[in-house]
Amino acid sequence: MTMSTLNERKLPPRRIGLSSAWLVTALSAALVFAAALLTRTGVLDLPPIYDELYHLVPAMSWQTSGTLEVLDGSYERGAIFTRLVALGFALAGEQSTAAARLLPSAIPGALLVTVMFLWVRHVADRPAAWITLFFLLFWPNGIEVSQYIRFYALHGLVFLVAALALYGAATAAISTSARIGFCALAVPLLLLALKLQLTTVIGIGAIGLWSALVYGPGWLRRHRWLRWALLAAAAGVVLIAASGAADELLAKYWRIYRWEPWPVQRDTTFYHRDFRDNYPTFWPLFPIAAIAALRARFMPASFAVTLFSVCFVLQSFGGLKNIRYLYPVMPFFFATWGIVLSFYGGRALRRLRGALLELFPHRWSVPLRTGAAVLAIAASSLFVAGANTGFSRGLKLALGSETQMLLGKRRWEWPDARAQLQPWLEKRAVVVTTEELLAVQWLGDYDFALNRPRFSEMLFSLGPDTQPFVRDFRNGRPLAGMVSDFEPVLHCAPVGVLISNASFLSTGLAREFAAMARAQGATISTEQSGSSALLAWERAGDPSGTAGCLEDAGIFYPDAAAALLSGTRQPQSVSSANAER
């Protein structure tokens, strides 16, 4: 028998083994995706929160006219995502919140879990992957973002795949052409991630820092010219900084990094508190876990720890704060713990099991003592999981038990608002609101917005000299930030209403507005119905003169009452389940 014959006989088993491995991987990925999607559809069909309307309303416009219009403006941010929402409507055959959430958010959210599971399984081991999966399945931020009609779930998936592609290009034992292929995959994905969210820059910087820390010393030892290049680059940076040539550019990006809408809080411990409250066992021990993970599996652990830590620290000192901004890198926090618990947990469990076997009465049979030990360890593990509210919150969200809130914001609905407003529209009242998109959703139009946080965004976008009643480019309606700004409106409009959420009537803002209206000789009346509230003013005067008076004051007047009464503007609502279910 020749050697070639032996090789031929050995070949089929290797092929079968390889096929079996791929089959197991594919089956595992499918099961993980299904489980992740199941945990990310519990509140899929509930009403939208305010921010989700930024994509819902333009998506409806995209379906009907191929534009991203909101009233007389256009919402262009995340246009790719908005088109995906419209595609979700088309595929489902209905304009519903479930259709808007499934394709653009829930599926990318489930894919992120699947990709992370497969990566940890590949670079560490199966136990580490399953432990990471447990964290990911009951991750409250992940579950909420995956049912949020904004681009964060898509951004997280795109960034994660790009980051892992770069990791594979740097660490895998593959050919040069394969490395180029990984990089070719990562570059457009990072560009897409950057288009979706500017915080991608921090993630790219974290990947660059990891590369420099892990590979930099070796590169500098092997290539002397790199040392001179590094010194030249450092000298160039010092010279540019000393010359002041980059001062304006640096000031611009520092302003972007530190900016936050009114009220400015400078809350640098926001993310720390979130982790402390959701993972009180795992967060304080994370520095120790990071060291242990580096000892266990240096390359993947160093990548995970660097990406998470850099983004956590820089986001903490940045201006805007929301836990969803850490969505793309939080899986690396879980992966670090997966590696640690897999590597050291087996030894710890064996010792604990041995201690328990010695602790239980020896007159018990070995199977009885073993069973009791397993039960005690399981109960202890459940206790730890239960003590970390992130898991219980995640379970509640997965089961669809939390129906009123999403990412800390309430699902306000105004089903009675149009009926509330009707008698005032017939009097040709000016329509003011503090909730612009809710007015578009439930009424169809409004005249003026009183919204200080959003006016602060206009100041940031257009400059500090921006005047009240500037037209918001997102919807074309005049926007002001202070109650005092509305003095000319109250002077010109003898009849008007301010419509908002039910809680508005008890605020200082409502009292200040009512006092200013009374100072103009108006009578104030209020009405609350369900989740909406109306504050109306009325005094002697002819409403037909409102437009000319406001024009003289330099204020654009859309005349929402005329548009609503004529049917030119219609409510922009989508179907959803009842939040009170």
Image (cartoon, rainbow, N blue to C red):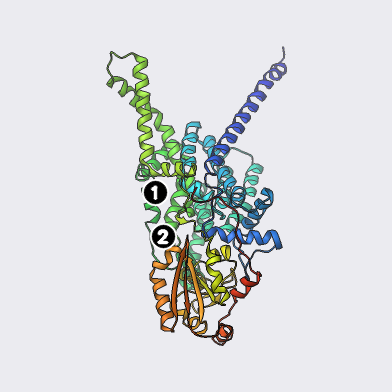
Residue 240 showing in the rendered view: no
Quadrant assignment for the N terminus: top right
Whether label 2 touches label 1, CB < 8 Å: no
Q: Amino acid at mark 2?
A: Phe
Give 527 or 11, whichever is nearer the viewer. 527
Residue located at (46% from left, 35% from top): 131
> Residue 198 occupies which quadrant of the picture?
bottom right
Q: Is residue 19 above or below residue 116?
A: above
Q: Earlier in the sequence, mark 2 or mark 1?
A: 1
Residue linked to disc 1: 275
Q: Is residue 4 above or below residue 508?
A: above
Question: What is the secondary structure assignment of the residue under circle 2?
Answer: helix
Q: Amino acid at mark 1?
A: Phe
In the image, which is nearer the foreground, mark 2 or mark 1? Answer: 1
Left or right? Give the position of 87 relative to 352.
right
Answer few, some or many: residues within 10 Å of disc 1's Cα (few below 14, many 20 plus, some between 14 and 19): some
In this view, the residue farthest toward the bottom is: 552
Residue located at (49% from left, 83% from top): 488
Q: Is residue 437 above or below residue 283?
A: below
Q: Can you give x and y, in whole percent of width and height, for residue 209 in the image? A: 49, 52
Q: Can you give x and y, in whole percent of width and height, for residue 497 in the image? A: 50, 73
Q: Is residue 302 above or below residue 86?
A: above
> Residue 425 occupies which quadrant of the picture?
bottom right
Q: Can you give x and y, in whole percent of width and height, for residue 34 in the image? A: 57, 37
- What label does residue 293 carry, if any? none
Q: Can you give x and y, in whole percent of width and height, for residue 222 in the image? A: 53, 47
Residue linked to disc 2: 317
Give 282 or 568, whichever is nearer the viewer. 568
Question: What is the secondary structure assignment of the residue under circle 1?
Answer: helix
Mark 2–mark 1 distance (CA, rounded to whole Å): 16 Å
Residue located at (42% from left, 71% from top): 510
